[in-house]
Image (spheres, rainbow, N blue to C red):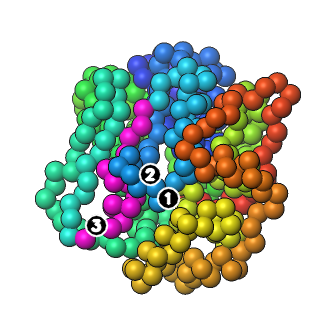
Amino acid sequence: MLPDFQFYDTIIVTGSGGKDSLACLLYLFELGISKEKIEIWHHLIDGREGSCLMDWRCTEAYTRAIAEAFDVPIYYSWLEGGFEREMLRENTTKAPTWFETPDGLCRAGGTSPKLGTRLKFPQQGASLTVRWCSAYLKIDVCAIAINNQSRFSGRRTLVISGERAEESANRASYAEFEPDRTHANTRHVDRWRPVLHWRTEQVWNLIRRYRVSPHPAYRLGFGRVSCQFCIFGSDHQWATLWLIDPERVERLIAYEEQFGLTIHRSMSIRERIQRGTPYPLLNLLDIAAALDDRFIEPAIVPKGKWRLPAGANGETCGSP
Ligand code: SF4
């Protein structure tokens, strides 16, 4: 069932740089929704304070290129200091959240005196209590950015996200349409997951039809794209990442050793690298594109040149 788009003043497509959120955006175009209502929101996992621990370097530039290609505004938001600061909390308060708006950069939160200590990676699990990266760096950031913008007060907003049932039993249990967690007496906010019941082929077919360049990580063979060093990464992914980006893998290994606790509870990153086999067909241009903080390719691939990336048939490990 489609929402009544006339009902909403603003439609926010939350994006990760991956194929599913891209398909959500393209689906709105298919449905003929006015671009004037649409905005893309992207949460920067590493923040903008200098940390560069977890995410693909190209993701911010890639998402901006997609937004520009379709002439849709994009707003970035993040927890100050990103993943690394949150992970290294030791008797410190939660950082403030920063979010771009049509009127400029805003800041909210970070005022609670409550002290907390993590000094460990998020745990692999469906519960957001232990998988704190999803909660603190994405879900809460989005909610804080909505709750603290008066432009949503007294208005109707539709938030769109790209979870798909095929990806996990947890996602299969999500509602396709429901009130968003930011819905309140003072503002109407709904959540729609338009691709929840889509198959992977449908997603790629839509991207092919619009000839959108997939995130470079798909060309390297990654089947799902969000954080480069996702805590749910497989042995083969760790072996691939070790091959293409060893310095950053070493930093994660150093944190495992410092914490005395590995990301995977029974195997260290070093052990996982040894167990895995790097993805085949890696080429230097694709590696360079994924690890570049610029995105210098056309966001829309010239006619006849679009190719299904290796990752379209790749492993599907990732956030549950
Ligand atoms: S992609 Fe992986 S590491 Fe990144 S926030 Fe989601 S679960 Fe955490």
- Residue 161, percent from left and from top: 52, 40
The residue shown at (68%, 58%) is: 316
Q: Earlier in the sequence, mark 1 or mark 2?
A: 2
Range shown magenta: 75-90
Q: Is mark 1 within 8 Å of ligand 1?
A: yes
Residue denoted by label 1: 54
- Which amino acid does the dot numbered 3 rest on? Arg
- Residue 217, percent from left and from top: 67, 50
In terms of image quadrants, where is residue 63? Answer: top right
Q: Is residue 270 visible?
A: yes
Residue denoted by label 3: 89
Left/right placement of residue 310 relative to residue 270 reads right
- Which amino acid does the dot numbered 2 rest on? Ile
Residue denoted by label 2: 45
Instruction: Examine the structure image and report whether residue 300 is included in the region drawn in magenta.
Output: no
Q: Is mark 3 within 8 Å of ligand 1?
A: no
Label of residue 134 in the image: none
Q: Earlier in the sequence, mark 2 or mark 3?
A: 2
- Which amino acid does the dot numbered 1 rest on? Met
Q: Earlier in the sequence, mark 1 or mark 3?
A: 1
Instruction: Examine the structure image and report whether residue 80 is included in the region drawn in magenta.
Output: yes
- Circle 2: element type: loop
- Circle 1: element type: loop
The residue shown at (77%, 33%) is: 208
- Residue 181, percent from left and from top: 36, 43
- Circle 3: element type: loop
Q: Is mark 2 within 8 Å of ligand 1?
A: yes
Left/right placement of residue 8 relative to residue 318 reads left
Neighbor class of circle 1 (other Cα within 10 Å; few <14, some 14-19, many 20+) is many
Label 1 with label 2: CB-CB less than 8 Å: yes
